[in-house]
Image (spheres, rainbow, N blue to C red):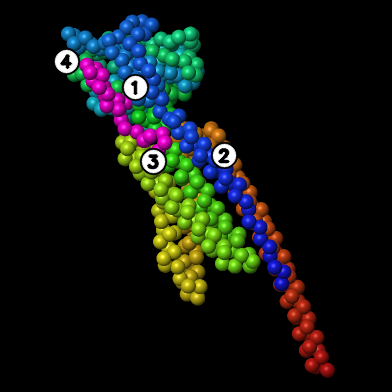
Amino acid sequence: MRQRRCHVAGATPLQLVAVAVLLAAATAAGGTVVGRCTTSTALRTYAKCIALPTQGATLAWTYDARNATLDAAFTGSFISPSGWVAWGVNRDAPAMTGARVVAAFSDPSTGALLALPFVLSPDVKLQASPLVSRPLDIPLLASSASLVGSARTVRDGATVTIAATIRLSPNRTKLHFVWNRGLYVQGYSPAIHPTDASDLASHATVDILTTATEASPTASAALQWAHGSLNALSWGFLLPMGAAVARYLRPCASTGPAWFYAHAAVQATGYALGAAGFALGLVMGSASPGVTYKLHRGLGVAAATAGSLQTLAMLFRPKTTNRYRKYWKSYHHLVGYGCVVVGVVNVFQGFEVMGLGASYWKLGYCMAMATLVGGCVALEVNAWVVFCRRQQEEKLMRREVEDVVVVKDRAAAF
């Protein structure tokens, strides 16, 4: 019988992912950007100002207690030549739904900068209907928008100031402000904004007398990067590699039981790192109320549940002679491969959540996975070649045995 030789692929994918993790941690400081406020604008000078906690936005204002009017100037930046920037007030809570805002964007017909009022009803959040400008049901006395600096037209990075005068309820000085920006406008209707954590946390409660600010808590950038790196390395790479180890090393007679120990070690390491990444996700969720990613969270819970079931199944692993062993193996394969698929899909979903859908980090992960998948394809082809060759050898051996038997029978007959 011809002995099969096995070649174990190098650790190139693991090295790529590890380098990506280290570089990602080194750039973790590039998360939420906080601007520097100023009370002076091109139009007038205000009494107070604050730097808002996200998007590098600032707010300056003057409050006249005699007639309860607020003159405010919000400063933000565009992220697209066809994008929009909006700022407004929510009377009930620091949230987008229910806010009354003024949005600035280029007129699709003339290119002039517009400042139009919008009411953000629950239908807008559900995207059940397009956002249509309409008069606000709050005393908005005046509003305008103007580009800051040398910018003459809207472009990526251009700074805009939205000025507004609002009459407030007497003795109400704590206001819920919301702000955001989007990539494009459909006609005169601003489209949905990005859903990064900083975008979803763009609201704050401000006391306009003391400038005291109550911003929504968000997970730190370092925590986000740690969560993403651990999960990409574990659910997205180590667990698929562990499954490949079991599939392609087990048939090798030369490896003996080493394939099992290698499979168990890789899977145990992947599950431990994945559990840590999942725990960080729970911490981030509790630290960011109101910031939810339903699909990403659901896939994460599914992957963690499947991984935990696989771990518990090892405690009830029947012996090879047990008649239930084949059912256990079917369960083990089904849940294991399902966990791998869900984990990899959720890693790609995580890139979108972190706003890295077109980043080098995603490219590095794709290269690592392509290397792993390429190795698996090569090993799968080799396995089928060896299987077919072995079938042919067994068929030839059966024929030889049959020929020997026939010769013996004929000799016995004589």
Of callouts 4 and 1, the N-terminal one? 1
Local secondary structure at mark 1: loop
Which kind of residue does numbered mark 4 sit on? Pro
- Foreground mark, 2 or 3, reads 2
Q: On the image, which quarter does residue 262 sit in?
A: bottom right
Of callouts 2 and 3, the N-terminal one? 3
| Residue 21 percent location from the top left of the image | 50, 40
323 w.r.t. 120: above or below? below
Q: Is residue 216 magenta?
A: yes
The magenta segment is: 203-223
Give whichever of 18, 277 is nearer the camera: 18
Cα gap from disc 3 to disc 4, whole angstroms: 40 Å
Residue annotated with mark 2: 364
- Crowding at mark 3 (Cα within 10 Å: few <14, some 14-19, many 20+): few
Q: On the image, which quarter does residue 47 sit in?
A: top left
Seen at 49% across and 19% down, the residue is: 156
Q: Does the magenta stretch include residue 83?
A: no
Cα gap from disc 1 to disc 3, whole angstroms: 27 Å
- Crowding at mark 1 (Cα within 10 Å: few <14, some 14-19, many 20+): many
Residue annotated with mark 4: 170
Residue annotated with mark 3: 294
Of callouts 2 and 4, the N-terminal one? 4
Residue annotated with mark 1: 52
Q: Residue 306 carries which label?
A: none
- Do the numbered discs 3 and 4 sit on residues whose CB atoms are within 8 Å? no
Which kind of residue does numbered mark 3 sit on? Lys
Of callouts 1 and 3, the N-terminal one? 1
Local secondary structure at mark 2: helix
